Protein backbone atom coordinates (compact mmCIF):
# COMPACT_ATOMS: atom_id res chain seq x y z
CA UNK A 1 0.00 0.00 0.00
CA UNK A 2 2.87 2.38 0.76
CA UNK A 3 4.30 1.77 -2.71
CA UNK A 4 0.87 2.19 -4.32
CA UNK A 5 0.37 5.58 -2.61
CA UNK A 6 3.81 6.77 -3.70
CA UNK A 7 3.19 5.61 -7.28
CA UNK A 8 -0.21 7.33 -7.39
CA UNK A 9 1.24 10.65 -6.19
CA UNK A 10 4.14 10.38 -8.64
CA UNK A 11 1.71 9.72 -11.50
CA UNK A 12 -0.39 12.74 -10.43
CA UNK A 13 2.71 14.93 -10.36
CA UNK A 14 3.67 13.98 -13.91
CA UNK A 15 0.34 14.99 -15.50
CA UNK A 16 0.13 18.73 -16.20
CA UNK A 17 -3.66 18.57 -16.55
CA UNK A 18 -4.00 17.35 -12.94
CA UNK A 19 -3.77 20.41 -10.71
CA UNK A 20 -4.78 19.41 -7.18
CA UNK A 21 -4.46 16.15 -5.24
CA UNK A 22 -7.05 15.17 -2.63
CA UNK A 23 -6.18 12.30 -0.28
CA UNK A 24 -9.04 10.71 1.67
CA UNK A 25 -10.17 7.42 3.16
CA UNK A 26 -12.48 5.06 1.30
CA UNK A 27 -14.38 3.93 4.39
CA UNK A 28 -15.52 5.43 7.68
CA UNK A 29 -11.95 6.15 8.74
CA UNK A 30 -9.13 8.01 7.05
CA UNK A 31 -6.28 5.64 7.93
CA UNK A 32 -5.81 3.43 11.00
CA UNK A 33 -2.04 3.17 10.55
CA UNK A 34 0.11 0.09 10.31
CA UNK A 35 -1.22 -3.41 10.89
CA UNK A 36 0.69 -4.35 14.05
CA UNK A 37 -0.42 -7.99 14.03
CA UNK A 38 2.56 -8.98 11.89
CA UNK A 39 5.22 -6.82 13.51
CA UNK A 40 7.10 -9.85 14.76
CA UNK A 41 7.94 -10.84 11.22
CA UNK A 42 10.93 -9.29 9.48
CA UNK A 43 9.82 -7.28 6.48
CA UNK A 44 11.25 -8.76 3.28
CA UNK A 45 13.39 -6.39 1.24
CA UNK A 46 15.06 -6.62 -2.12
CA UNK A 47 18.24 -4.66 -3.02
CA UNK A 48 16.26 -1.54 -3.99
CA UNK A 49 14.32 -1.53 -0.73
CA UNK A 50 17.45 -1.74 1.41
CA UNK A 51 18.70 1.47 -0.22
CA UNK A 52 15.86 3.52 1.24
CA UNK A 53 14.16 3.80 4.62
CA UNK A 54 10.69 2.40 5.30
CA UNK A 55 9.01 5.81 5.26
CA UNK A 56 10.28 6.84 1.80
CA UNK A 57 6.72 6.74 0.47
CA UNK A 58 6.01 10.22 1.92
CA UNK A 59 8.62 11.80 -0.34
CA UNK A 60 6.40 12.16 -3.47
CA UNK A 61 3.92 14.14 -1.34
CA UNK A 62 6.77 16.27 -0.02
CA UNK A 63 8.22 16.88 -3.46
CA UNK A 64 5.17 17.70 -5.59
CA UNK A 65 4.83 21.42 -6.21
CA UNK A 66 1.09 21.14 -6.82
CA UNK A 67 -1.33 21.74 -3.92
CA UNK A 68 -2.32 18.68 -1.88
CA UNK A 69 -5.38 18.43 0.38
CA UNK A 70 -6.04 15.85 3.05
CA UNK A 71 -9.79 15.24 3.34
CA UNK A 72 -9.80 13.81 6.85
CA UNK A 73 -13.06 11.92 6.88
CA UNK A 74 -12.50 9.78 10.00
CA UNK A 75 -9.85 8.54 12.40
CA UNK A 76 -6.19 9.19 11.52
CA UNK A 77 -3.98 7.01 13.71
CA UNK A 78 -0.23 6.45 13.72
CA UNK A 79 1.06 6.35 10.16
CA UNK A 80 -2.34 7.66 9.06
CA UNK A 81 -1.61 10.84 10.97
CA UNK A 82 1.73 11.01 9.17
CA UNK A 83 -0.06 10.69 5.83
CA UNK A 84 -2.46 13.50 6.73
CA UNK A 85 0.39 15.75 7.88
CA UNK A 86 2.25 15.18 4.61
CA UNK A 87 -0.48 17.11 2.77
CA UNK A 88 -0.42 20.90 2.45
CA UNK A 89 -3.91 21.53 3.87
CA UNK A 90 -5.97 19.30 6.17
CA UNK A 91 -9.76 19.67 6.04
CA UNK A 92 -11.45 17.53 8.69
CA UNK A 93 -14.99 16.32 9.06
CA UNK A 94 -16.39 17.03 12.51
CA UNK A 95 -16.58 13.23 12.83
CA UNK A 96 -12.80 12.89 12.37
CA UNK A 97 -10.33 12.15 15.17
CA UNK A 98 -6.56 12.30 15.55
CA UNK A 99 -4.96 9.36 17.36
CA UNK A 100 -1.20 9.72 17.94
CA UNK A 101 -1.08 6.36 19.72
CA UNK A 102 2.66 5.61 19.42
CA UNK A 103 3.51 5.89 23.13
CA UNK A 104 0.56 3.72 24.10
CA UNK A 105 2.18 0.94 22.06
CA UNK A 106 5.69 1.59 23.38
CA UNK A 107 6.78 3.17 20.11
CA UNK A 108 8.35 6.46 19.10
CA UNK A 109 6.72 8.57 16.35
CA UNK A 110 7.29 7.59 12.73
CA UNK A 111 6.17 8.45 9.20
CA UNK A 112 7.25 12.07 9.60
CA UNK A 113 4.85 12.77 12.47
CA UNK A 114 7.52 14.25 14.75
CA UNK A 115 8.68 16.91 12.31
CA UNK A 116 5.30 17.86 10.87
CA UNK A 117 3.45 17.88 14.19
CA UNK A 118 5.97 20.13 15.93
CA UNK A 119 5.81 22.56 12.99
CA UNK A 120 2.05 22.83 13.42
CA UNK A 121 1.72 22.88 17.21
CA UNK A 122 5.10 23.87 18.63
CA UNK A 123 7.41 21.68 20.70
CA UNK A 124 5.57 21.57 24.03
CA UNK A 125 2.16 20.74 22.58
CA UNK A 126 3.64 18.11 20.25
CA UNK A 127 5.44 16.47 23.18
CA UNK A 128 2.24 16.40 25.24
CA UNK A 129 0.23 14.98 22.38
CA UNK A 130 2.74 12.24 21.62
CA UNK A 131 3.54 11.18 25.18
CA UNK A 132 -0.03 11.26 26.48
CA UNK A 133 -1.27 9.56 23.28
CA UNK A 134 -4.78 10.97 23.73
CA UNK A 135 -7.28 10.72 20.89
CA UNK A 136 -8.38 14.23 19.85
CA UNK A 137 -11.71 15.16 18.28
CA UNK A 138 -11.56 17.39 15.22
CA UNK A 139 -12.40 20.57 17.15
CA UNK A 140 -9.43 20.16 19.51
CA UNK A 141 -7.16 19.30 16.59
CA UNK A 142 -8.25 22.56 14.93
CA UNK A 143 -7.58 24.59 18.08
CA UNK A 144 -4.04 23.16 18.23
CA UNK A 145 -3.38 23.81 14.54
CA UNK A 146 -3.13 20.14 13.57
CA UNK A 147 -5.96 20.53 11.05
CA UNK A 148 -6.82 23.68 9.12
CA UNK A 149 -10.62 23.50 8.83
CA UNK A 150 -13.42 21.49 10.42
CA UNK A 151 -16.64 20.99 8.45
CA UNK A 152 -19.90 19.28 9.46
CA UNK A 153 -19.97 15.72 8.10
CA UNK A 154 -23.02 16.45 5.95
CA UNK A 155 -21.18 19.29 4.19
CA UNK A 156 -17.75 17.68 4.12
CA UNK A 157 -17.56 16.40 0.53
CA UNK A 158 -18.89 19.70 -0.84
CA UNK A 159 -16.43 21.78 1.21
CA UNK A 160 -13.45 19.70 0.07
CA UNK A 161 -14.62 19.89 -3.54
CA UNK A 162 -15.02 23.68 -3.35
CA UNK A 163 -11.51 24.08 -1.93
CA UNK A 164 -9.99 21.81 -4.57
CA UNK A 165 -11.80 23.64 -7.36
CA UNK A 166 -10.62 26.97 -5.95
CA UNK A 167 -7.00 25.78 -5.96
CA UNK A 168 -7.40 24.31 -9.46
CA UNK A 169 -8.69 27.64 -10.81
CA UNK A 170 -5.42 29.39 -9.91
CA UNK A 171 -2.88 29.53 -12.77
CA UNK A 172 -0.67 26.44 -12.44
CA UNK A 173 2.61 28.37 -12.34
CA UNK A 174 1.22 30.73 -9.69
CA UNK A 175 0.11 27.84 -7.48
CA UNK A 176 3.39 25.97 -7.83
CA UNK A 177 5.64 28.99 -7.24
CA UNK A 178 3.55 30.17 -4.27
CA UNK A 179 3.82 26.73 -2.69
CA UNK A 180 7.58 26.67 -3.33
CA UNK A 181 7.98 30.13 -1.78
CA UNK A 182 6.03 29.26 1.38
CA UNK A 183 7.89 25.99 1.74
CA UNK A 184 11.40 27.43 1.30
CA UNK A 185 11.15 30.98 2.66
CA UNK A 186 11.16 30.23 6.44
CA UNK A 187 14.67 28.75 6.21
CA UNK A 188 16.15 31.67 4.23
CA UNK A 189 17.80 34.86 5.53
CA UNK A 190 15.59 37.89 4.90
CA UNK A 191 17.70 39.38 2.06
CA UNK A 192 17.90 36.00 0.33
CA UNK A 193 14.14 35.50 0.74
CA UNK A 194 13.41 38.88 -0.86
CA UNK A 195 15.70 38.07 -3.80
CA UNK A 196 14.06 34.62 -4.06
CA UNK A 197 10.63 36.29 -4.23
CA UNK A 198 11.85 38.47 -7.09
CA UNK A 199 13.22 35.46 -8.98
CA UNK A 200 9.99 33.48 -8.63
CA UNK A 201 7.95 36.55 -9.57
CA UNK A 202 9.89 36.84 -12.83
CA UNK A 203 9.10 33.20 -13.64
CA UNK A 204 5.43 33.73 -12.82
CA UNK A 205 5.14 36.97 -14.81
CA UNK A 206 6.65 35.36 -17.90
CA UNK A 207 4.25 32.40 -17.96
CA UNK A 208 1.36 32.14 -20.46
CA UNK A 209 -0.98 31.47 -17.52
CA UNK A 210 -0.06 34.81 -15.97
CA UNK A 211 -0.62 36.65 -19.24
CA UNK A 212 -4.05 35.04 -19.62
CA UNK A 213 -4.95 35.90 -16.02
CA UNK A 214 -3.93 39.55 -16.50
CA UNK A 215 -5.96 39.75 -19.70
CA UNK A 216 -9.03 38.27 -17.98
CA UNK A 217 -8.61 40.72 -15.09
CA UNK A 218 -8.36 43.66 -17.50
CA UNK A 219 -11.49 42.47 -19.34
CA UNK A 220 -13.48 42.42 -16.11
CA UNK A 221 -12.20 45.88 -15.22
CA UNK A 222 -13.18 47.29 -18.62
CA UNK A 223 -16.64 45.67 -18.53
CA UNK A 224 -19.38 48.14 -17.42
CA UNK A 225 -20.61 47.48 -13.89
CA UNK A 226 -24.14 46.09 -13.50
CA UNK A 227 -24.27 46.68 -9.76
CA UNK A 228 -27.15 48.84 -8.53
Image (cartoon, rainbow, N blue to C red):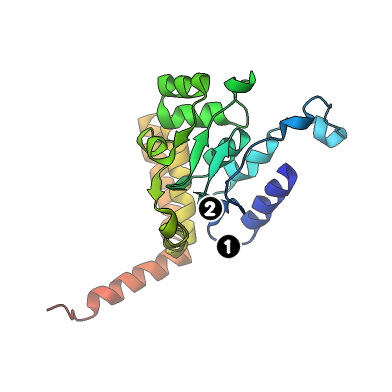
- The image quarter containing residue 123 is top left
**Nearest the camera: 107 or 224?**
107
Q: Residue at x 59, y 50 (%)?
A: 25
Disc 1 target residue: 18
Q: Where is residue 221 shown, x and y percent of the image?
A: 24, 73
**Nearest the camera: 132 or 165?**
132
> Is 105 left or right of 65, judged from the image as shown?
right
Say few, some or many: other residues with alpha carbon within 10 Å of mark 2 (under 14 / 14 to 19 / 20 or more). many
Q: Residue at x 45, y 30 (%)?
A: 119
Q: Quadrant of the C terminus?
A: bottom left
Looking at the rendered structure, the secondary structure element under dot 2 is: loop
Disc 2 target residue: 66
Q: Residue furthest left?
A: 228
Of marks 1 and 2, which one's residue comes earlier in the chain?
Answer: 1
The numbered disc on residue 74 is none
> Is 189 left or right of 135, judged from the image as shown?
left
Q: CA distance from mark 1 to mark 2?
A: 9 Å
Q: Are marks 1 and 2 in contact (CB under 8 Å)?
A: yes
The vertical placement of 212 against 35, above or below, is: below
Say few, some or many: other residues with alpha carbon within 10 Å of mark 1 (under 14 / 14 to 19 / 20 or more). few
Looking at the rendered structure, the secondary structure element under dot 1 is: loop
User: Is residue 60 in view from this perspective?
Assistant: yes
**Nearest the camera: 142 or 114?**
142
Q: Residue at x 86, y 32 (%)?
A: 44
> Is 61 left or right of 210, judged from the image as shown?
right
**Nearest the camera: 97 or 56?**
97
User: Is residue 86 in view from this perspective?
Assistant: no
Q: Where is residue 215 shown, x and y percent of the image?
A: 35, 72
Q: Where is residue 27 shown, x and y percent of the image?
A: 61, 52
Q: Quadrant of the N terminus?
A: top right
Q: Where is residue 67 shown, x and y percent of the image?
A: 50, 52
Amino acid sequence: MRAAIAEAVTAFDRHDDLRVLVVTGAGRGFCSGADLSGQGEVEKHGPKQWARHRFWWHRPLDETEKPTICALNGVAAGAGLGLALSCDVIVASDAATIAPAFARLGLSPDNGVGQRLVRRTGYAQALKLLLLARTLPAGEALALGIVDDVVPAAEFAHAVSELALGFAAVPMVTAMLTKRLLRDAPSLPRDVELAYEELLLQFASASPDAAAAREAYAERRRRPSTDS
